[in-house]
Amino acid sequence: MQSSLVSKFTRRVAFGVPGDQALPANPVAWASAQVAALPPIDVLDPDGKRRQDLPADMRLLWSMDEVMRTFEQHQRTERLSFEKAKELSTKDFQEERERTVFTPFVRLEHWKEVQARETTALYGQAPVFERFWHFWSNHFMVAPGNQNNDTLVGPFQRSLRPLMLGKFREMLLHAVTHPGMLVYLDNNRNTGPNSKAAREKWTKDSINENLGRELLELFTLSPRAGYTQKDVEGATLILTGWRDMKPDKWHKGQKLGTYFDFDRHEPGSQEVLGKKYTAFFKPSGKLEDLVSDLAIHAATAEHLATKLCVYFLDDAPPAAAIARVKEAFINSQGDLPTVHRAVIEACWTHLEHTRKFVSPETWFLQVLTLTGTEPPRTVPITKSTPGIKTPFLLGDLGQELPRCPQPNGWPIRSTDWISKEMLDRRLRVLGVLANMSRRTGMAQQALRRIVAGCQRDVPAQEAAAQLLLKPEVQADMRLAWVAYLASPTLLWS
């Protein structure tokens, strides 16, 4: 079995294998085994081990109670900061907000989540699982928005992980009713025009179509299914009353997290795709019924199969690959491990005839994996804190996690990441990482891995391989990194 093909496959479905380590003898079995069980977050899982190279006081928000209390605290602190603005100078106000709002609730929360995500990808038990998790957290995009929802983003993304072992229906229902999604797409303000709250003027909130539209457009059917604005309106009305519950003086003792507010829900029946949804005894059941229908719809299977194949295989994936993944989805009724295995098999079957220009995050993790370089660990206490911060480094590459600018997620097509500017950014980041490796005493180990990987990954006649084997290049760390890690072989998988 040609080593360059196996190496390409490990970069296609994961982040590669270091050049000085053995490639899997059975690549498909190696990858398929990794999507069959839930690996722990390799940083701060309460039941797992923590890495010694992380700050001792760094911890993630895990329980829903803790997540919602922190969310409420962020919003309250935000309000208090603006009240203090009346007494402070502009400079003092900015410093107050940096200290009390931005650093603890925004900068550090996002930094912790990115550290957990990247560390698990690099050192966790199942890098293939992590690649699929990156897909699903991008498919069900939740990002910082206009409701100070920063503390909800990471916990939402992590909550998807165990659901990757079940049916798509369960993941879909969880995603659209999680407080992270309800707040991000403003469904916590979605109120039926004929609801009790609207009739009695308890609120100024009204209809909000954000989540209803994305449920059909992004998460399930896609516009190719031919749904109409009436269908969006029906889904929106079914979603009225689904809100987030955080601690307040009116709901003491009530469970925090997702809350169905019957008084804000639109009464009666709603219609989507020609079917009426009614639930006299359990109004919240209308959404459950709608999700069940959407999750197994043929258009949903087509949309997800196509998107998975574009993400992993090619901007124009082979029709046979899409058909295989779609068939696996339909026959298993959306069993995600079955679907993931079908994607893995399609990646191997069509490996020689497809290619993907890797996204900034995947390329960054690939570089760290292949060179054995530790990810930057600088804690961004303030904007001016010296040192390399992983989220900002990803931002330099064009993908500052988790700040995705649109609900449809980060681009998954190669063409969206190829430009002179984006390539120049990768070259500059390689220089930064090479210097970091030199400072940490990892330079020689990294160089040995680069040489071994280049000899394994690319044909001897490729320019990158010829350049890298020259003594003057091996003597210059920067040139060595660029020759291999910015070569077409490593930019494409």
Image (spheres, helix red, strand yellow):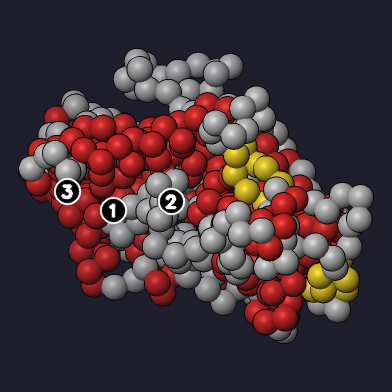
Q: Identify which residue is drawn at 8% across, 43% down.
A: 89
Can you give x and y, in whole percent of width and height, for residue 41 in the image?
53, 30
Q: Identify which residue is drawn at 40% across, 40% down.
A: 75
Q: Identify which residue is drawn at 19% across, 27% down.
A: 440
Task: Using the image as rendered, state which of residue 458 and residue 389 is in the foreground.
Answer: 389
Tell whether 393 sits left or right of 286: left
- Earlier along the polypeptide chain: callout 3 or callout 1? 1
Q: Identify which residue is drawn at 82% across, 73% down.
A: 271
Number of the front mark, 3 or 1: 1
Residue where numbered disc 1 is placed? 395
Residue where numbered disc 2 is placed? 147
When asked about the image quadrant of residue 345, the answer is: bottom right
Task: Using the image as rendered, state which of residue 131 and residue 410 is in the foreground.
Answer: 410
C-alpha gap between disc 2 and disc 1: 22 Å
C-alpha gap between disc 3 and disc 1: 16 Å
Q: Secondary structure at mark 1?
A: helix
Tell whether 451 sits left or right of 382: right
Can you give x and y, in whole percent of width and height, for residue 457 in the image?
42, 52
Looking at the rendered structure, the kind of residue marked 3 is Gly
Q: Is residue 47 above or below residue 64?
A: above
Looking at the rendered structure, the kind of residue marked 1 is Gly
Category of crowding for the residue at label 1, using alpha-carbon neighbours closer than 10 angstroms: few (below 14), some (14–19), many (at least 20): some
Q: Are marks 2 and 3 in contact (CB under 8 Å)?
A: no
Tell whether 255 sits left or right of 79: right
Q: How many discs mark residues in the rendered view?
A: 3
Can you give x and y, in whole percent of width and height, for residue 156 in the image?
55, 42
Residue lying farthest to the front in this orientation: 200
The circle drawn on residue 319 is: none
C-alpha gap between disc 2 and disc 3: 38 Å
Q: Is residue 84 visible?
A: yes
